[in-house]
């Protein structure tokens, strides 16, 4: 009988709470990470967490180094790798909302170093997942890296970030509903490996967020605790699955395509939220399920229309009708739904 063996990598330590950043050195000792850290961050995260991390390591006898990244492209990843090679650092710490974590993730996998994620905002599930997104011109490329060995999420720091970032994180979690539906479709078509356990974890995470939406809306440290926990669960679901299927389906394709059709500064989670309304309609029609999703997103102050998202109605139609072209992933969008159907779906759900 053929023996099938798979490796799943999961975070070993998740430290979540007020003042978590101050415990970073004991965590590194616990993990027995060798050498000194290279801290990768951007301007604001450097001030709210990066400098404290640097100080903590210096006080514990390490010689940490910090790189403040300027742009988000491939050239910054190359620069980080050059720095890592030059000084032979032992491990990498990504401190920030998205980009520093993505870059730290990719650099660490290329150099076979461990990576610690220190999110300063709860805006997407990349803080805990093995997927990294790197732009190439105007196009975002999603690449496989590895999950962080530890996640250190200081709820006090995250609670002080703008609410729109947390609301985007909530929408990214809610998208698990349609992502799992798409994954089941792909399984039925024989187009994807499926994990019952990862799918259940992903759906439960989104369900718990919806059930606790009033707590989340208090915008307190407890709310942030809840959202970060859910983002970590989504990341773990992806690690168990060995793919992004549990948290990324047609709604994510729509979001990536919207980036191409109408480039702008919109948040990933917010675009995905609108995509979830649209693809839920495609899955369940007038059953009202899409309304539940839309109501929750509205409560959370997430955009639910083209106008609120800051894109034209034409862009929504184009992105929805061409999203299937973006990636070799089977979803409810199938081989494309056509502009007429895309317009009907967007109008019926009130997106346009
Ligand atoms: Zn996402």
Image (cartoon, rainbow, N blue to C red):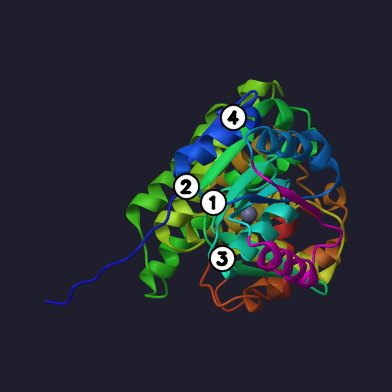
Separation of residues labelled 3 and 4 (CA atoms)? 24 Å
Range of magenta residues: 62-88
Q: Nearer the viewer, residue 333 or 260?
A: 260
Task: Answer whether labels 2 and 1 touch (C-beta < 8 Å).
Answer: yes
Q: Which residue lies furthest to the front in this view?
A: 61
> Which is in the foreground here, disc 3 or disc 4?
4
Q: Which of 57 and 304 is in front in this view?
A: 57
Q: Is residue 305 found left or right of 325 in the rendered image? A: right
Where is mark 4, residue-wise?
Answer: 23
Considering the numbered disc 2 on the image, is that residue within a helix, a strand or a loop? Answer: loop
Residue 109, which numbered label?
Answer: 3
Name which of mark 2 and mark 4 comes first in the sequence.
2
Considering the numbered disc 4 on the image, is that residue within a helix, a strand or a loop? Answer: helix
Where is mark 1, residue-wise?
Answer: 148
188 over 124 or under it: above or below: below
Q: Whole-percent x and y of residue 5?
A: 27, 68
94 over 160 or under it: above or below: below
Task: Answer whether labels 3 and 1 touch (C-beta < 8 Å).
Answer: no
Name which of mark 1 and mark 4 comes first in the sequence.
4
Name which of mark 2 and mark 1 comes first in the sequence.
2
């Amino acid at each position: 009988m053929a023996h099938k063996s798979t490796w799943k990598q999961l975070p070993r330590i998740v430290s979540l709470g007020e003042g978590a950043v101050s415990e970073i050195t004991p965590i590194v000792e616990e993990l027995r990470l060798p050498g000194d850290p290279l801290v990768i961050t951007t301007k604001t995260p450097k001030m709210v967490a990066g400098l404290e991390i640097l100080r903590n390591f210096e006080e514990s006898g390490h010689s940490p180094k910090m790189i403040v990244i300027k742009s988000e492209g491939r050239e910054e990843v190359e620069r980080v790798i050059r720095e890592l090679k030059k000084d032979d650092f032992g491990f990498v710490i990504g401190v920030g909302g998205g980009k520093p974590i993505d870059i730290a993730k990719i650099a660490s996998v290329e150099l076979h170093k461990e990576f610690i994620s220190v999110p300063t905002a709860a805006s997407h599930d990349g803080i805990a997942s093995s997927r990294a997104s790197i732009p190439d011109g105007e196009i975002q490329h999603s690449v496989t890296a590895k999950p962080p060995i530890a996640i250190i999420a200081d709820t006090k720091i995250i609670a002080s970030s703008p609410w729109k970032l947390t609301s985007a994180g909530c929408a990214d979690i809610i998208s698990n509903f349609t992502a799992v539906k798409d994954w089941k479709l792909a399984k039925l078509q024989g187009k994807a490996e499926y994990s019952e356990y990862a799918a259940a974890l992903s759906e439960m995470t989104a369900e718990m967020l919806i059930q606790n939406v009033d707590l989340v809306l208090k915008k307190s440290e407890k709310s942030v605790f809840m959202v970060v926990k859910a983002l970590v669960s989504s990341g773990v679901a992806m690690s168990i699955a060995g793919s992004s299927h549990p948290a990324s389906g047609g709604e994510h394709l729509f979001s990536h395509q919207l980036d191409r059709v109408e480039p702008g500064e919109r948040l990933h989670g917010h675009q995905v939220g609108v995509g979830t309304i649209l693809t839920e309609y495609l899955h369940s029609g007038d059953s009202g399920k899409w309304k539940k999703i839309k109501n929750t997103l509205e409560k959370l102050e997430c955009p639910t229309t083209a106008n609120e998202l800051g894109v034209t109605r034409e862009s929504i139609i184009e992105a929805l009708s061409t999203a299937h072209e973006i990636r070799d992933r089977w979803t409810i969008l199938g081989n494309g739904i056509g502009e007429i159907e895309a317009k009907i779906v967007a109008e019926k759900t009130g997106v346009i």
